[in-house]
Each structure stands twice: as C-alpha cells, then as structure tokens.
Image (cartoon, rainbow, N blue to C red):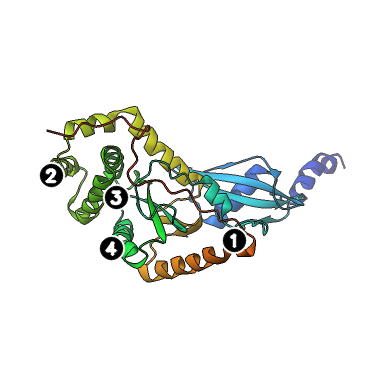
Amino acid sequence: MRLLISLLPLLLMAQAPKSALDKPTLAAYVRHLMLYPAAVNLAVGDPAPSDVPGLLEVSITATMGQASEVRKFLVSKDGTRILQAEVYNVAQNPFKPNLDRIKTDFRPSFGTPGAPVVVALFSDFQCGYCKQEGEALRKELTKTFPTQVRVYFMDFPLEQIHPWAREAALTGRCIFNQNALTFWDYHDWAFAKQADLTEINFKEKRNEFLKSKSLDPAAIDRCIQGPAAVKALQASVQQARDLGVNSTPTMFVNGRKLGGYVPWANLKQIIEIEIGYQATANNAGEKCCTMPALSPFPASNPVLPPITPKK
C-alpha cells in the first residue's frame, strides 16, 4: 500500500493530458509537425491574447546559424488544440498587416510613382530564381504596365548559402546612394554575370563595372565598410523577417505575399486582377492601402553618406 501511495504522483503525471500551453510539449509537437531537425533551436514564446476570441497566440522562433523564422499558432485555452492559420479582419484590406510592415523609403525602384499596384521584391543577387524573377520584371513590367505598377527592390541576401551575396547587396546600396539609375545598371549586370561571379572574383569583377560607370571602387569600399550601409542592409533583412520571409525571391503585390519564383505569365495575371480590384475598391467602401511610392531620383538620401565619382 505504501508503495502504491508513493507511486501515485508518477501515475497521475503519466495520465495527465499533453498541453500546448506547456512549452517543451509544444516545441516537441511542432518539431515533429514541421520536420525541424535536431540542429534547429525552437524558442517558444509566452501565450498572449489573439485576435480571435477564445484563443491564445503563441509564437515559435526557429533558428539555425544565421537563419531564422517565426511561426505563430493559435492555441485553445485548455491547451488541447492548436491551429496554424491566417486571421483576417473583414473590415479592412486582408493584406493590411503586411502593408503596415513594408517600408519602401530609400529603396531602389522603377515604374510609375503613385501607381495603383506596388511590388516589393525581396531578392538576393546570388540566387538563381531571383535572377529569373528580376530579369523578367525588368524586361516585361514597364512594357506591359507602363503606368500601373511600381517595383521596389529589397535586399535579403542568404549569407549562409551564398558567400558573395552580402557584399553584392552592400555594393548595390552604395551605388544607389550615388545614382538611382546606376543601381539598375548594376542590378542588371549582377544578374547577367551571376554564373561567372564567385566569392574570390566578385570584387575584381565589380570594380570593372564601377569603373565603366565612372565610380571610384575605393569610395564604394569605404561606403561598404561604413556603419550606414550595414545598418541599411540590416534594416532590410529585419523587415523581411518581420514579414515572415525565409527564402528568395519573395514578392509582395499590394501586400499579397508570393513566395518563390513566380513565372511572368502568372505574375502578369495577378497584377491585372489587382489593377481591376483597385479600380473599384473605393466604390466597395475600402480605402486603398498601397505603399507610398517615392521619386526614383531622390534629391538627397540621408541613409548613406555621398560617394564622390571617380574623375
């Protein structure tokens, strides 16, 4: 009898139902659910009120090296059920949460300022699918939509798998600070030469490009090594993570997230549908929530110091 009494707490613990409100239990469950290997660290946040009455929200941050992503789960208050779902408020644009997070200030852009459709493209100069997406946009977009679309280029170099992507991104930021149009020359050059560029030869090839545009490579290097360029790149990367971006290319078309490479024919159809929707959105009682468009030629750029062209 004494032995049974002493074992009773253990028996009760063994029979206790699993609860998603127990952090180790939820972490183990999500690891199995999402196929996270043991090398991925899972940090479970504290339960917080959600936008859905009766449900709690729990965020789980998965990290491995420099890579990370955040997944949000809705949990029943008794801890027996979890949901992974997008929650929409029918009283507002379904993509407003994304639009509120996307900041296009001082980002390279082309297309029509104030256009009804705004595309924010998170890209990586060493990414093969980014090359395909970028080249298609440059070739087709303004030809097909001469006044209806504005595109913003957002840096998201995947440093853990692309060894020269970070330097390429910083180079682009510094060139853009000197001249907005030259950035797009660089953008096109980097993707056209992508197969020939390596971690070893990138700087040499880049310097050849800079000299062809009458830019001083030493001045670009000073900009790259300065804190302002690094800060601007970090802000772009953090913005991507806040938006749940974990791969490139990832686009947001008026806030609608499109992960992975989207063939031009498919993207063209999405843009056409969004143009039609925006033409009638105000009549439907909705205020247009597109991102602000900036001039493609800002008079000044307070993010980075100026660069002196090579004489």
Query: Which residue in the protein does label 2 denote?
Result: 212
Q: Earlier in the sequence, mark 3 or mark 2?
A: 3
Place of residue 289 in the rendered image (x, y in percent of width and height, measured from the top left): 55, 53
Inter-mark Cα distance, 3 to 4? 17 Å
Pick the residue in front: 273 or 186.
273
Q: Earlier in the sequence, mark 4 or mark 2?
A: 4
Q: Earlier in the sequence, mark 2 or mark 1?
A: 2
- In which quarter of the view is residue 268 placed? bottom left
- Count of labels shown? 4
Mark 1 in CB contact with mark 4 (< 8 angstroms): no
- In which quarter of the view is residue 233 placed? top left
Rendered residue at 13%/44% (across/down): 212
Q: Earlier in the sequence, mark 3 or mark 1?
A: 3
Query: Which residue in the protein does label 4 denote?
Result: 139
Residue type indicated by callout 2 = Ser
- Depth check, mark 3 against mark 4: the one in front is 4
Q: Earlier in the sequence, mark 1 or mark 4?
A: 4
Mark 3 in CB contact with mark 2 (< 8 angstroms): no
Residue type indicated by callout 4 = Lys
> Vertical placement of 265 versus 189: above or below?
below
Pick the residue in front: 122 or 241.
122
Q: Secondary structure at mark 4?
A: helix
Q: Is residue 25 found left or right of 307 in the rendered image?
A: right
Query: Which residue in the protein does label 1 denote?
Result: 282
Query: Which residue in the protein does label 3 denote?
Result: 125
